[in-house]
Image (cartoon, rainbow, N blue to C red):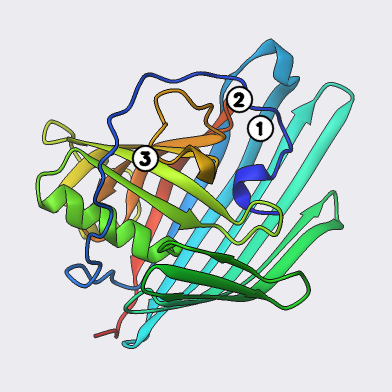
Amino acid sequence: MNRFYLFLLPCALAIPSLSVADDKSVSTGETRLPGHRAVYELELGESLDTAGIMSAEGRYVFDLEDVCEGYTLNERLVVRLGREGGNVLTDYRLSAYETDDGHLYRFSTETEFNGTTGQSASGDLSIDGDVSEVDYKVAEDVSFDEEVLPPLAHIRAIVNSAKAGEDRYAATVFDGDVDKPVFYAVTRITPAEDLETPEDINGADHLKGRDHWRIDSVYFPPESAGEADSSMPEFRFTAILYDNGVVTDLVLDYLDFSLKAELTEIEVHEGGC
C-alpha cells in the first residue's frame, strides 16, 4: 500500500484545467540532492463531512543519503486518524535505493493498520529508454512502454524545470504499489520570492538564501496522460520546494480530507559527492 492510498478513501473532487507539457524528458543530472533528514509533524487540514475524519496527528520522516553512485532513501509516515467509531493508526515504511541516473529503483514498502500488516511490496524498477519494467518479488511483474520516473528522479526533474523557468512539469511516476504502481503527475511551478524561511525550524540555516518555488502536484490515473483537464485526480500535494530538494509547507491532500505536514527539523548529512 503506497502512501497515496494509506486511508482507502474515495476521490471525488474536480480540479481546474491544466495545460500539460508534452516534453517530460528533463534531465535529472543537473541537480544533485544533498543527503538530509527532514522531520514533519502532521495534523488535520480540511475535512469534508463525508470523510468521517474528526482529528489527525502524526509524524513523517524523510531520510536521504547520497552514496555517490546513487541515493538511499528511508521514509516513515505514522498517523493516527480519529474517525467516527474509533481511531485508526497507520504506519507506512519505505526503504529504497535509486541510481544517480534514475534508471534503477530498488524498493521495499510495508504498511500496518492498528498494528496489523496491511500490504507490503518489494522489487526493482528498471528503465531502458522508453521501456520501464517492474520486477516484483512476490507479485506479477509489469511493464510500461514509456519512461517511468522513480521518486528522486521526479523531484530532481521538477527542480531542474523550476531552475529553467518552466511553470509546469508532467511525467509518469512510480510509487511502488502493486495494484496502482504508476501515476501521471502534473506539477504547477510558481515563484515564491516573497516567502521567508521560517525561523522556528531546527536547522533552518540549511534553507536560508536558497532558491525556492511553490509547487502543486496533482496525480491522475496513468491513462489520463494528456487529458488532465477532464480527468479526476486521485491525490495531490502542495509545498514550497527548495533547490536542494527539501520541502516546507507540505499539504497531503486525499481530496476529501488533507493532512498538513509542518517541517520542524532539517539535518544535512556529511559526505556524498
Residue 148: image location, x then y, percent = 44, 62
The label number, if any, that marks residue 186 in the structure image: 3
Specify the amino acid type for callout 3.
Val
N-terminal-most mark, 2 or 3:
3
- Which residue is outermost to the front? 145
Specify the amino acid type for callout 2.
Phe
The label number, if any, that marks residue 141 in the structure image: none
Q: For mark 2, what is the residue?
A: 257
Residue 125: image location, x then y, percent = 53, 73
Which mark lies nearer to you, 1 or 2? 2
Which mark lies nearer to you, 2 or 3? 3
Tell me the distance, in whole angstroms, between the alpha carbons under discs 2 and 3. Answer: 20 Å
At x 77%, y 44%, the residue is 89
At x 43%, y 41%, the residue is 225
The label number, if any, that marks residue 56 in the structure image: 1
Mark 3 closeness class: few <14, some 14–19, many ≥20 residues within 10 Å: many
At x 19%, y 51%, the residue is 161
- Which residue is outermost to the top? 49
N-terminal-most mark, 1 or 3:
1
**Marks 1 and 2 close (CB-CB < 8 Å):** yes
